[in-house]
Image: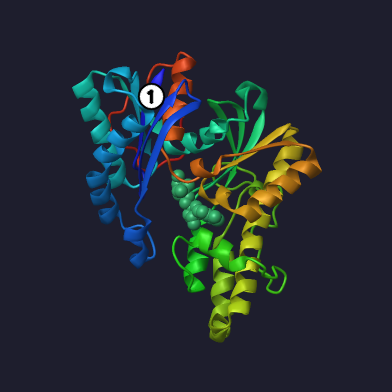
C-alpha cells in the first residue's frame, strides 16, 4: 500500500510517499521560513503563492526519491485542515486534480491527527497497538493539546490552551527579546547556558483545580500562555536596557522557556498518573526542543512510563505523517475520507 501525502496547511510545502503506514519511502519539505522572516510571522498571501509554485516540483521530487511511478501509488492523501484557508486550498485542489488525472482515490486528513500519528513513524516502535492507552502532548505553533489515545483513531481531549499555543508564546517572546523568527529555535539557542531561575515567569492556570472551562474541560488540565508573554513585556518595558546585555537575554530566554515547559510537564505528569497509563508521547514543532526532550525523558524515568517523541524530522509540518495516517486508515479497512473542501478551523476529527 503506497500513499502519496501532500501537506500545505501553513508555511511548509511537503510531499511524501509512505508504504503500509509506517515505512517512509520519501519525505520532501520545502520551508518558506526565509520568505516570511522579514515579516516576523507567516503572511498567508506569500504562503499560498509559494505553495502554488513549489507543490508540483515537490511532489515529483517525492515520487522520484521513493523510486515509484504514478501507477504504483494506491491513494493520495492531503491535509484538509486546520490551517490557513488559502494554503490548504492549494494542496487540496492539487490533490483533487491529480486524483482526476490518475484515477486514484483521494482522502482528506486532519493536520492535528497527522501530528499525533507522527510518533508512529518512529522506527523503534515495532508494535503500535502496544502503546495504548497513551497520553500525548501535541505542541505546535497553533495548538497545545493534551490527549488520551486509546488507538490510532480513538482520541480524547483532556486539556488545551485557552489562549496562545506554546509555540506561539515562544515565537512572540522571541520577537519581544529581539531574537529571530521562528522563535522556538531562537529561544532555545539564546537560552543555552542561561540561568532559568534569575527571572521568575508565571506558569499559567495554577488555580481552580475543580473548575470546568468552556467545552467542559477541567481547568487544571488546560494551559494559558498569554500571561507569560505579558510578564516578559512588562519586564522589558521597565528595563529596556536588558536587551543590550547578552547575558541578561540568555537568562531571560532560559527563564521564559522553562516557564513555558513547566506548564506542559505539570499537566502531562498529572494526566499520566491520574489516567494510569504506561506510555506517553510528544509531537509537533516544539517537540524538536532539546531542553523539552530532556525534561520529558526525566519525567518518563521518574514515572516509569515509556516515552515516544516524534523523530526530529517529523516534528515540524511534513507530509509523511499525513500519508502515514492515511495508510493506517486504509490498513484498518476504513474507507478514504472524502475531501470536498478545506476545513481551516476546528480542531481534531478522525
Ligand atoms: O508543528 P509546526 O511546524 O507547525 C504548526 O503546525 O504550527 O510548529 C511550529 C512551531 C513554531 O512555533 C516554532 O517556533 C516551534 O514550532 N519550534 C520550536 C522549535 N522548533 C520549532 N519550539 C521550540 N524549540 C524548537 N527547537
Ligand atoms: Zn503542524
Where is residue 70? Give x, y as percent.
27, 22
156 sits left or right of 23 in the view = right
> In front: 49, or 85?
49
Density class for disc 1 (Cα within 10 Å; few <14, some 14-19, many ≥20) is many
Where is residue 127? Give x, y as percent.
63, 22
Instruction: Give the image quarter of residue 80.
Output: top left
Q: Residue furthest left?
A: 101
Secondary structure type for disc 1? strand
In this orientation, does residue 331 appear?
yes
254 sits left or right of 54 in the view = right
Instruction: Give the image quarter of residue 327.
Output: top left
280 sits left or right of 232 in the view = right
Which residue is tagged 1? 3
Q: Residue at x 61, y 24 (%)?
A: 128
Q: Residue at x 59, y 48 (%)?
A: 213
The CB of the residue at mark 1 lies under 8 Å from ligand 2: no
Q: Residue at x 34, y 42 (%)?
A: 8
Where is residue 96? Give x, y as percent.
24, 28
> In front: 98, or 57?
57
Ligand 2 found in image quarter:
top left
Where is residue 140? Give x, y as percent.
50, 49
In this orientation, does residue 166 appear?
no
Amino acid at each position: 500500500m503506497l500513499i502519496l501525502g501532500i501537506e500545505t496547511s501553513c508555511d511548509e510545502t511537503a510531499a511524501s510517499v509512505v508504504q503500509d503506514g509506517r515505512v517512509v519511502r520519501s519525505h520532501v519539505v520545502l520551508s518558506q521560513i526565509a520568505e516570511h522572516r522579514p515579516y516576523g510571522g507567516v503572511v498567508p498571501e506569500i504562503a499560498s503563492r509559494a505553495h502554488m509554485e513549489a507543490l508540483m516540483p515537490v511532489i515529483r521530487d517525492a515520487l522520484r526519491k521513493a523510486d515509484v511511478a504514478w501507477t504504483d501509488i494506491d491513494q493520495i492523501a492531503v491535509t484538509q485542515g486546520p490551517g490557513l484557508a488559502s494554503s490548504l486550498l492549494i494542496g487540496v485542489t492539487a490533490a483533487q486534480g491529480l486524483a482526476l488525472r490518475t484515477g486514484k482515490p483521494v482522502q482528506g486528513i486532519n493536520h492535528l491527527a497527522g501530528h499525533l500519528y507522527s510518533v508512529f513513524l518512529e522506527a523503534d516502535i515495532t508494535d503500535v497497538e502496544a502503546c495504548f492507552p497513551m497520553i500525548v502532548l501535541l505542541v505546535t505553533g497553533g495548538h497545545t493539546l493534551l490527549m488520551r489515545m486509546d488507538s490510532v483513531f480513538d482520541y480524547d481531549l483532556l486539556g488545551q490552551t485557552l489562549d496562545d499555543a506554546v509555540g506561539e508564546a515562544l515565537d512572540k517572546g522571541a520577537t519581544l527579546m529581539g531574537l529571530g523568527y521562528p522563535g522556538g529555535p531562537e529561544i532555545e539557542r539564546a537560552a543555552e547556558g542561561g540561568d532559568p531561575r534569575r527571572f521568575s515567569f508565571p506558569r499559567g492556570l495554577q488555580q481552580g483545580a475543580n473548575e470546568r472551562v468552556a467545552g467542559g474541560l477541567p481547568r487544571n488540565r488546560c494551559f494559558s500562555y498569554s500571561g507569560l508573554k505579558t510578564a516578559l513585556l512588562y519586564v522589558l518595558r521597565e528595563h529596556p536596557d536588558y536587551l543590550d546585555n547578552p547575558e541578561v537575554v540568555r537568562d531571560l530566554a532560559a527563564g521564559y522557556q522553562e516557564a513555558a515547559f513547566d506548564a506542559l510537564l505539570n499537566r502531562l505528569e498529572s494526566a499520566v498518573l491520574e489516567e494510569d497509563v504506561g506510555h506517553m508521547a510528544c509531537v509537533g514543532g516544539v517537540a524538536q526542543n532539546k531542553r523539552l526532550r530532556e525534561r520529558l525523558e526525566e519525567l518518563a524515568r521518574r514515572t516509569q512510563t515509556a516515552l515516544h517523541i516524534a523523530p526530529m524530522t517529523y516534528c515540524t509540518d511534513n507530509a509523511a505523517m499525513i500519508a502515514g495516517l492515511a495508510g493506517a486508515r486504509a490498513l484498518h479497512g476504513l474507507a478514504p475520507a472524502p475531501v470536498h473542501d478545506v476545513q481551516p478551523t476546528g480542531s481534531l476529527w478522525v
